[in-house]
Image: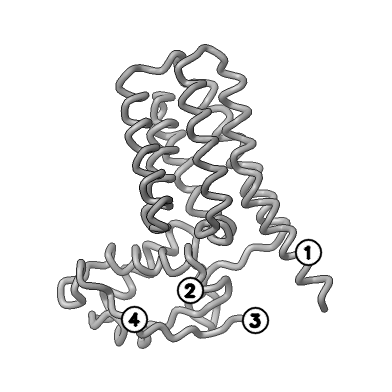
Amino acid sequence: MTTEVLLDEPLGAATAAAHAEPADIAKVLGEDIIFGRLAPGARLTEDTLIARFNVTRHFVRAALAELERTGIVVREKNKGVAVRSLTPREVGQIYEVRELLQRQAALRIPLPASPAVIAELERLHAQYRDHLQARNFTGVHEANDAFHLTMFAACGNPYLVESIKHYMWQSLPVRAKKTADYAHAEASERDHFMIIQLLKGTDSWALAQLCVEHLQGAKNDYLRKIALASDAY
């Protein structure tokens, strides 16, 4: 069942509505999904978004097309656009692909990794830690994705990295459940530290295994909550 969510928050001072671009609108809506302000199944109606962002229908449609391209919203026949709702089967399939892609990318990173890669990952790790201490979970989310994409870029295959990025977006409805969970973010920070240490060494298999294990917390929590919700009916 889909629900229409009316969000009347402005776009924000950093991107005043009068100057908003489709990418800005898509980013804000993506954050609404990440932080649970737009739940799976919530409808995104053009008129509501036009009023919220004070932009033309063309801009709203372009933003929705971008979100549809990433897979986090779907266009349903006779219903319009809604936040994608994932079944347990779909979650399992998406994470199976994520695990395959990330394991193979990790195995392809030459070890020890280059000093430039290590330095950038340490910078992003410090940034992540600072955002976490400040309870800035938008910053935590952005630093987290930047950390992983920087690491996987070291595999040297941009097509593989783009596929990883695509399925990171596909899993947003799952990841959103833990994005603002401090304990989960702390555990991720510890994993990031260990990833950096493994990149300084020579054990590719240990690095690949940690990259796969790193995915399991959000996935298992999401599936557990779906199961509990089903049992409640």
In the depicted structure, whether residue 147 falls above or below residue 8 = above
Residue at mark 3: 1
Q: Amino acid at mark 2?
A: Arg
In the image, farthest residue toward the front: 133
Mark-to-mark CA distance, 3 and 4: 24 Å
Mark-to-mark CA distance, 3 and 1: 17 Å
Of badges 3 and 1, the one in the foreground is: 1
Q: Earlier in the sequence, mark 1 or mark 4?
A: 4
Disc on res. 227: 1
Q: Residues within 10 Å of mark 3 (few under 14, many from 20)?
A: few
Task: Place residue 19 in its image quadrant.
Answer: bottom left
Q: Residues within 10 Å of mark 4 (few under 14, many from 20)?
A: few
Q: Amino acid at mark 3?
A: Met
Q: Earlier in the sequence, mark 2 or mark 3?
A: 3
Q: Earlier in the sequence, mark 3 or mark 4?
A: 3
Residue at mark 2: 37
Q: In the rendered structure, are the residues bearing label 2 and label 4 in contact, judged by CB atoms less than 8 Å apart?
A: no
- Give x and y (percent) for residue 165: 45, 44
> Which residue appears at 70% of the width and 51% of the height?
220
- Give x and y (percent) for residue 8: 36, 85
Q: Nearer the viewer, residue 139 or 186?
A: 186
Q: Is residue 70 left or right of residue 55?
A: right
Of badges 3 and 4, the one in the foreground is: 4
State which quarter of the image contains the N terminus. bottom right
> Which residue appears at 72% of the width and 64% of the height?
225
In the depicted structure, whether residue 221 falls above or below residue 225 = above
Q: In the rendered structure, are the residues bearing label 2 and label 1 in contact, judged by CB atoms less than 8 Å apart?
A: no
Mark-to-mark CA distance, 2 and 3: 17 Å
